[in-house]
Amino acid sequence: MYKSAPYHAMKNSLSFLFFFLTTLAIAQHSHSELEVTGTARLAIAPDTGVLNMTLSQVEMQFGDAINGLGSQTEDIKAQIRKMGFSEDDIFTDNFQVRKNIKYRNNQQIDSGYIATQQLHLDFENTVANIRKILRQFSSGATEFDLNFSFKISDPLKETVQDRLIQLATEDAFRKAGVIAKASGTELKKVTRIQYGNSYNAPIRTERAMMSLEADAMKVDGFTPSDLVYNATIQVVWAIE
């Protein structure tokens, strides 16, 4: 029986579609993958302390407020040098001068100017250093707000990051082995690795509790919590 051209075209199209779907199914089967996420978590005791100081000076004249703040800053730096720390380890920020506005009987009163500045000093986190800092400033003439922060140094941070990557990778490979054994599949080569981390842990801050009596000087509340770091890594295997 004679078949029309459209009939043959449709038959050829259906044959090609069947071949394409079959080939696609085989290709998908031959490229089966297993993706596993490895995780790691480390709690690290901070090796670096940061002394944070906020200075302020109130004067009626703008220039006097700045000069007074400068005198306070020099006094603090002198005390830091006296403790044996380097002035190169001191850095300043948040310097500002603003009007010292007060209110009395719902009326605004101009009370001169207030100059403020923050100083920070990094030091090795030891009880001896913290005790030395508190003892020094407890007898100083300059009054200021003081607190301590705790973090890890750059060399330790690099070591921690390397260890996190190692642990997360080992965790991914361990999990993949368990899954492959339980499912009766075989791990072939690794086809893709993606690393991610949540490395920036918060800096712990503790407020200084100072005793003004030298013989009673002690460090209370200065056992900073460990800083917790996390990392994840995605590893993809070809399996069969």
Image (cartoon, rainbow, N blue to C red):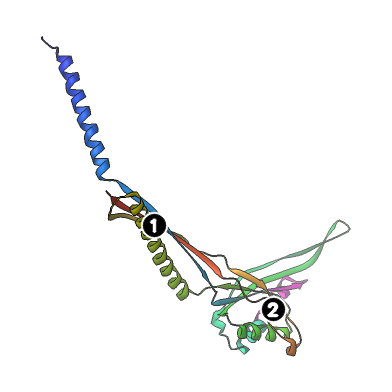
Question: What segment is highlighted magenta in the picture?
Answer: 54-74
Q: Earlier in the sequence, mark 1 or mark 2?
A: 1
Q: Residue at x 73, y 78 (%)?
A: 143
Point 45% across, 70% down: residue: 160
Residue 97 or 72: which is nearer the viewer?
72
Question: What is the secondary structure assignment of the residue under circle 1?
Answer: helix
Task: Return the x and y of residue 193 as percentages of the image width and height.
Answer: 34, 56
Q: Secondary structure at mark 2?
A: loop
Task: Decide which of 11, 142 is in the foreground and name it.
Answer: 11
| Mark 1 nearby-residue class (10 Å; few <14, some 14–19, many ≥20) | some
Q: Which residue is mark 2?
A: 220
Amino acid type assigned to the residue bearing label 1 in the image: Lys
Question: Residue 184: image x %, image y %?
Answer: 31, 50
The correct choice, above or below, for 49 with respect to 38 in the image is below
Circle 1 is placed at which residue position?
175
In this orientation, which residue lies closer to the viewer: 63 or 214? 214
- Seen at 66% across and 79% down, the residue is 73
Q: Amino acid at mark 2?
A: Asp
Residue occupying the far top of the picture: 1
Q: Is residue 62 magenta?
A: yes
Q: Which corner quadrant of the image does residue 100 belong to?
A: bottom right
Residue 199 in picture, x, y percent from top left:
48, 63
Left or right: 64 as drawn, with respect to 199: right
Q: Is 196 included in the stretch rendered in magenta?
A: no
Which quarter of the figure has residue 57? bottom right
